[in-house]
Image: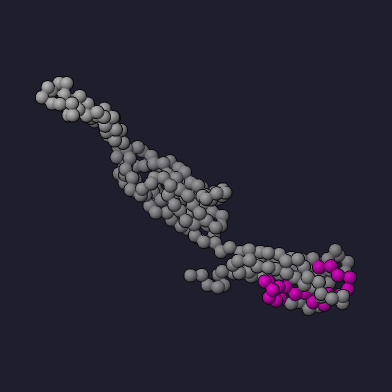
């Protein structure tokens, strides 16, 4: 868990205050609460600004309404309100789009992956890690509009056997990891053959069988089985 101090963000403020008479008091407010008071500040009557107000403050998560007031002999004047929204950085989340399973087997030497990465702050880098080794790194990826702020797509080189594939995403909150994909690379045997028969007509050649013994879609079944064998 974050401590209260770690959730605060320090920012610098600068304002130009003009006055024809001596400034008696300058006050700084955040969300209606007085943060700081400076009485009888030293002024510069020759420059554009009678008083340059410069101050660092800490803002909390959410909307911070910053306002400055200045008091002189004529009374009190307030600045416009500046809204500063502070969003606490959180670890990115990584969701696999492709492949659709964490256990994958292929006869190809590469694996096509797609992932959607969500982050409420700018990503600093996306790393592709295979078997514990970073094989690709994308620094400062571009954020896009839509449901998937950071879309990652890559062809992953595989070695024979099991390959552990994962993504790392880094932002201001730290580093997050995807679920690992185990991709098994089974190299194909070019000298292995399969003879697949799809016989639709049995009754014409075996007179003891009636037409109900025929298999109307045997050719399509054989074609489908061929595709499975190729995979």
Residue 72: say if magenta: no
| Residue beneath the point at 20% across and 24% down | 201
**In this rendering, position of residue 197 left or right of residue 171:** left
Q: Position of residue 127 (x, y in %)?
A: 47, 50
Residue 28: say if magenta: yes
Q: Quadrant of the C terminus?
A: top left
The quadrant where residue 49 appears = bottom right
Farthest-out residue, left: 208
- Viewer-proximal residue among 182 and 32: 32
**In this rendering, position of residue 54 left or right of residue 110:** right
- Viewer-proximal residue among 177 and 86: 86
**In this rendering, position of residue 164 left or right of residue 152:** left
Our reading of the magenta stretch's main secondary structure is: strand
Q: Position of residue 81 (x, y in %)?
A: 72, 66
| Residue beneath the point at 56% across and 57% down | 121
Q: Which residues are magenta?
A: 17-36
* Above or below, 68 relative to 98: below
Q: Position of residue 100 (x, y in %)?
A: 38, 46
| Residue beneath the point at 49% across and 57% down | 92
């Amino acid at each position: 868990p974050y401590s209260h101090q770690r959730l605060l963000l320090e920012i610098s403020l600068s304002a130009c205050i003009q006055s024809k008479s001596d400034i008696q008091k300058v006050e700084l407010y955040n969300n209606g609460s007085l943060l700081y008071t400076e009485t009888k500040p030293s002024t510069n009557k020759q420059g554009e600004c009678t008083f340059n107000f410069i101050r660092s403050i800490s803002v909390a998560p959410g909307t911070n309404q910053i306002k400055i007031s200045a008091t002189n002999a004529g009374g009190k004047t307030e600045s416009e309100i500046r809204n500063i929204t502070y969003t606490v950085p959180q670890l990115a989340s990584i969701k696999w789009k492709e492949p659709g399973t964490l256990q994958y087997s292929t006869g190809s030497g590469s694996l096509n992956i797609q992932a959607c990465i969500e982050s409420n702050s700018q990503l600093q880098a996306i790393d592709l890690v295979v078997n514990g080794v970073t094989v690709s790194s994308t620094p400062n990826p571009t954020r896009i509009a839509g449901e998937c702020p950071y879309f990652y797509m890559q062809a992953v080189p595989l070695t024979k056997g099991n390959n552990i594939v994962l993504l790392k995403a880094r932002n201001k909150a730290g580093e997050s990891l995807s679920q690992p994909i185990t991709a098994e690379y089974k190299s194909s045997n070019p000298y292995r053959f399969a003879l697949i028969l799809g016989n639709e007509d049995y009754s014409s050649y075996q007179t003891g069988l009636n037409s109900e013994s025929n298999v109307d879609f045997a050719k399509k079944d054989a074609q489908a089985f061929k595709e499975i064998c190729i995979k």
